[in-house]
Amino acid sequence: MRYQTFSARREGFLLHVFLGKTVCSTGHLLSLSFNFHTRSATLTDKAFTLQPPSHCMKRYNKIIILTAPSGSGKTSITRYLLDKIPTLAFSISAATRQPRGQEQHGRDYYFITPEEFKRHIKNDDFIEWEMVYEGKYYGTLKSELERIWSEGRVPVLDIDVHGGIHVQQEYPINTLSIFIKPPSVDELRRRLLSRGTETAESIETRVNKAAYELSFADQFRHVVVNDDLDTACKQAEEIVREFLQRD
C-alpha cells in the first residue's frame, strides 16, 4: 500500500509526521510520532472519511454535452430534452454578447462584460471557455456544474464544438457527448437567414465556421443528423435515457 506524507509538526520533544493514502472517499491516516527525549517512535492508524475533491467528483457526476455548428438545431433539441427528462438541468453559460429577443440573464446566459469574463479566466473559474468570434467570449463556469450536481441533477451543456471536446477530455468517463449535424451547409445557411437576426456578413462568417466545425463530428460519441427536428429530438432522447441508466 503506497502512502504519501501530508504534514509534519514539532512539539517540544515530539515530532509528528502524518501519512495518508490518496483516496477519494475513505482511507487511513497514519500518525508517526518520534520522541527525541526517549528516542522512541509510536505509529497509530486511524480510519477517516474524506469529502471527494473536485478531481474525484469526475467519477461520480454525469455530464451531457450537446454541441453543433450554429443553426443546427442544438438549442431546440436541448429544450426538448430538458422538458422530457426532469433529472436534467440546463447549464447556463457565461457570455459577453448582448441578449437576443426574450433572452434573460441567469436563465439563458450569464451576460457579463469582457472585463468580468477575463477576470474569471485569470481566476481559473471556467471548465471551458472560448473566444468564439472576435471579442465575443463564451464559457462554462465550474460553479455552475457544482450548483447542478449539488441538486442531484445532471447538467446539460449546450456549448461550442471546441468547448465540448475540452470538457469531454476533462471528464472522459462520465460524459455523454452528442454532435448535432445539419443535413448540409446550404440548409444551415438557409436556417440562419430565416432567423433574421444577423447581417449577411455575419451569417457567412458563421457558415464558414460551421463548415470547419463539421470536420470534428467524429470526435463525439454520438452524431444526430437534424434533417427532421422531431426525429432528431426522439433520437437524442433515446441516447440520453440509455446513458442515465448506466451506473
Image (cartoon, grey):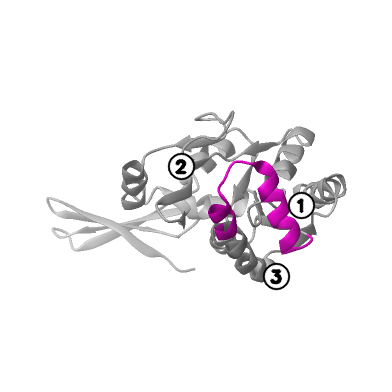
Comparing 187 with 127, the one in front is 187
Q: What x and y, as percent, mark residue 87?
A: 71, 36
Magenta-span inclusion, residue 190: yes
Q: Amino acid at mark 3?
A: Asp
Mark 2 or 3, nearer chain start: 2
Q: Is residue 94 visible from the viewing direction of this image? A: yes
- Residue at left offset 53%, top offset 62%: 166
Q: What secondary structure is found at the residue carrying circle 3?
A: helix
Q: Quick check: can you spot residue 46? A: no
Give the foreground label among 2 and 3.
Answer: 2
Q: Quadrant of residue 198?
A: top right
For disc 1, the marked residue is: 243
Label 1 and label 2: CA atoms lie apart by: 33 Å
Report, in whole angstroms, how far the alpha carbon at label 3 lies from the one at label 1: 19 Å
Disc 2 and disc 3: Cα gap in Å? 29 Å
Is residue 52 part of the magenta span, yes or no? no
Overall secondary structure of the magenta section? helix
Residue appearing at x 62%, y 65% in the figure:
213
Q: Which label sits on residue 97?
A: 2
Q: Position of residue 150 (x, y in %)?
A: 56, 35
Stretch in magenta: 183-205
